[in-house]
Amino acid sequence: MSGEAAIEAQGLVKSYGDVRALDGVDLSAPSGTVLGLLGPNGAGKTTAVRILTTLLPADGGSARVAGLDVGTQAQELRQRIGLAGQYAAVDENLTGLENLQMVGQLYHLPKGEPKARAAELLERFDLAEAGGRLVRTYSGGMRRRLDLAAALVARPPVLFLDEPTTGLDPRSRIGLWETIEGRVADGTTVLLTTQYLDEADRLADRISVIDHGRVIAEGTSDELKDQVGGEALEVTLEAAGDAEAAIAALDGFCSAPPERDGVVLRVPVAERKGTIAHAVQRLNDADIGIDDISMRRPTLDDVFLNLTGHAAEEAEEGEG
Amino acid sequence: MSTGISDTLVLAKRNFLRIARAPDLLLAFTVQPIMFVLLFAYVFGGAIETGGQSYINFLIPGILVQTMAFGGFVTAMGIAEDLRKGLVDRFRSLPMSRSAVLAGRTLSDIVTNAISITVMLVVGVIIGFGFESPFLHVVAGILLLLLFGYAFSWVFAFIGLTSSSPEAAQSLGFIVIFPLTFVSSAFVPPETMPGALQWFAEWNPFSITVNAIRALFIGDPAGNTVWGAVAWSIGIAAVFGVLAVAKYKRAVVR
């Protein structure tokens, strides 16, 4: 499988009535990598996952997962994928152990294997003690862990995680991230949808930004950040009234027009080295008080705002 | 095919565990039928003329058939719940048989229906019901009741897949099936109904099944009603089985 894409989709189209949920989406994830699908609610992320996991037929386009066609080879493909959805899809009236055992039986693992595998996964997901308890006594984080464990029962080479950490507390999120990283280290290919940029930043090798059913940007986290621009100096002023003077004082640094948001100035700069010391001196000379000053590299938040912000401006122009 | 059967058994086991762990559900299969038997026998019994037959002997077959028709409501609620919780998505992403989730549900209904039949017959006998037919006819009658209940489990499976919530599934099932059971020969002789209702009651599969059970339990003249009842049950199971499985394949989370 090395070199071949584990997930490959071309021109996926799906409509619900008049709503075009997917409008020609291409996706690709080489074997053993994490593809992040980033987008706001209703962008089409879940629809894409549902098509790739054989739950929903596409209206157009084609997709192969683990070398199998999602339309014509669906039943074989289901042996090779694991899905953890937006909901913790576990049975509340079964114990953790029984849930995993049931999934193992439904994957048709050899006799004895479902139970052994269930025990092993409970251990790994820190649920060994709770394994004999009914799931309805579990916390939200425990349910998500169990749900993810269920997706891993058959050791699938391709894993689909649809917003796996939505609604989780920060500690549980980080725990889940570490588990996902562990799977990837073992060679699993992961497609991860998320609306959290830090999640995509941390886990994804490549990111496809999706909005209104289209991929509007694609690349590594760094490539996407570079599209927005390089580093910037961020200055928090003591008084908003000093903004004009501060911009004038920092004029020599600017590689692009500075942005202003209340007392915060954002000054794109070409060179990082020595910039802060130099800037502090200039502002001091101009007698401008500052609260805070730092260098900031664009985050995926900036990328996202930038990409979807453009879309919003176009829409407004269209209406006006 | 063999995986289809083993998948179905895996899911049927899941449903039994659920009933064992939420025993309040068992009330629906035990206390509720007893309540119906006692209410009808003692509240309406004295007022309804059943042509020489004791009302309790007239009533028990009718109320058994009604109870079988509603036995599948657990299937409707369970499936609606599985849809809402995303479990149906998980099952559909697994390499398992496409019909196993529904078949597992309807299979476990047979067991709970058997519990209901036992409870009601015991209570019925205590308050004066007596079989007036050969033992083998009684056995055949019980099998027919289970078959009829199984057919309606598939109706409920379809209702569960069509409803927006377990609560909606329950009330939709009630609205669809309750009138059918009442406009029938289950509780009163249809001859007492107005013309159109009487015509409906005579052709209603409930009446045909109730009449068949009366033939098998208390020796009413059978005519073709037993085979008619078997045919109706198989027909209903086949039609709603196909509809429900087709619906399941396209099911979406709500």
Image (cartoon, coloured by chain):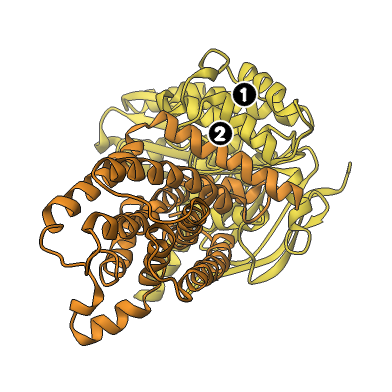
Chain colours: A yellow, B orange
Residue B15 vs residue A235: left or right?
Answer: right
- Work out whether residue A126 can be spotted: yes
Q: Quadrant of the N terminus of chain A?
A: top right
Residue holding disc 1: A178
Which is nearer the eye, B4 or A262? Answer: B4
Determine which residue is flagged by label 2: A147
> Would residue A188 be found to the left or right of residue B9 on screen?
right
At 50% from the left edge and 48% from the top edge, which residue is drawn? B110
Camera-nearest residue between B214 and B27 = B214
Mark 2: give few (<14), some (14-19) or many (20+) Cα within 10 Å. Answer: many
The disc label shown at residue A100, or none: none
Question: From what the image shows, is residue B246 above or below residue B118?
Answer: below
Given the image, on which type of amino acid does mark 1 rest?
Answer: Glu
Q: Secondary structure at mark 2?
A: helix
Q: What's the amino acid at mark 2?
A: Asp
Measured as percent of width and height from the top left, residue B248 is found at: 55, 60
